[in-house]
Image: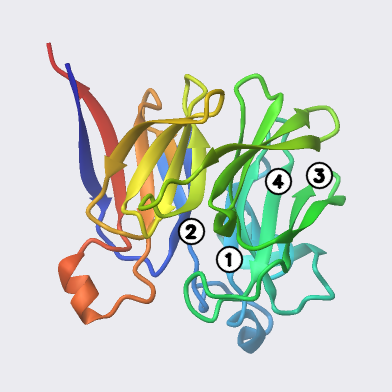
Amino acid sequence: MSSVKVKCVVKERCEIGEGPVWEEKEGTLCGHIRTEDPPLEPSNQSERDKKFVGCAVPRLSGGYVIGEGRSFGALDWESKSISTIAVIDEDKPNNRFNEGKVDPAGRLFAGTMAMEERPTVLELKQGSLFSLNKDHIVVKHFNQVDISNGLDWSLDHKTFYYIDSLTYTVEAFNYDINTGSISNRQMVYKMDEGEGIPDGMCIDADGKLWVACYNGGRVIQIDPQTGVCLQTVKLPVDKTTSCCFGGRDYSDLYVTSACKGMDEADMAKQPQAGCVFRVRVCVSV
């Protein structure tokens, strides 16, 4: 028999915890906090304060590549400095990057959205999905996106999975690992009433998708081949935001959460909102 155990492993609250990544070399969990005041050392503080860090991924040469505001940038963690790689959505100054992830060939895929008036309230169809190649060339794959969010690739690298949150769906595309091109867009899962808004996403060793459900207080496991929800794991917080696998054998699912927009009464009911959780399946004989 088996049971699922959920444990709060990072008790420091984030306004919006996002983008967890397990760094295998260090054996540590890396993530980022989306905030209007990132603890960096910019050349123009008043301008930098207005930008959001929408995604951050480790870089082979050291540091991180980030989506900050409407720019791809290289973050030197030691000096806390950022150098701009490319600027996107130049005709949409109210846009910002959101979720991002690296494909199996080393390209960074990341999407944009309009700045929110409050959580999930924003001008619709303003975002796009982009990729940044290793030669720093940026490719725009499509537009008309509401909130660009979870993304990952199948184990054989032939399928790209994607979430535009306010469509309440998980979609799949044919993927060409050699060129980074996507095609043949299809829906693989439609959220049921009460499951919440699909946010960050990752894939497990069996090729099943795990989706963090914002305002749903859960992560769900989906079979992308059948479009069936296989498992639901409830968490003690409503605003679950993203997830990734990590740990010694990658059997632990780490889930981030948010507390932005919650008042004192909400926080009293959910004191762990904004913390990071570990989901572990325990087998008993």
Upstream in sequence: badge 4 or badge 3: 4
Instruction: Tell me which amino acid carries mark 4.
Output: Leu
How far across and how far down the image is residue 236, in percent?
Answer: 22, 54
Query: Which residue is identified by label 2?
Result: 32
How far across and how far down the image is residue 244, in percent?
Answer: 45, 40
Query: Which residue is identified by label 1?
Result: 53
Examine the rendered structure and indicate whether residue 59 appears above or below residue 160. below
Instruction: Tell me which amino acid carries mark 3.
Output: Asn
Left or right of 1 on screen, residue 43: right
Label 4 CA crowd tier, 10 Å (few <14, some 14–19, many 20+): many
Mark 4 → mark 2, Cα distance in angstroms: 16 Å
Residue contact between numbered discs 1 and 2, judged by CB atoms under 8 Å: yes
Residue contact between numbered discs 4 and 1, judged by CB atoms under 8 Å: no
Residue contact between numbered discs 4 and 3, judged by CB atoms under 8 Å: no
Mark 3 → mark 2, Cα distance in angstroms: 22 Å
Identified at 56% across, 56% down, the residue is 165
Identified at 49% across, 51% down, the residue is 198
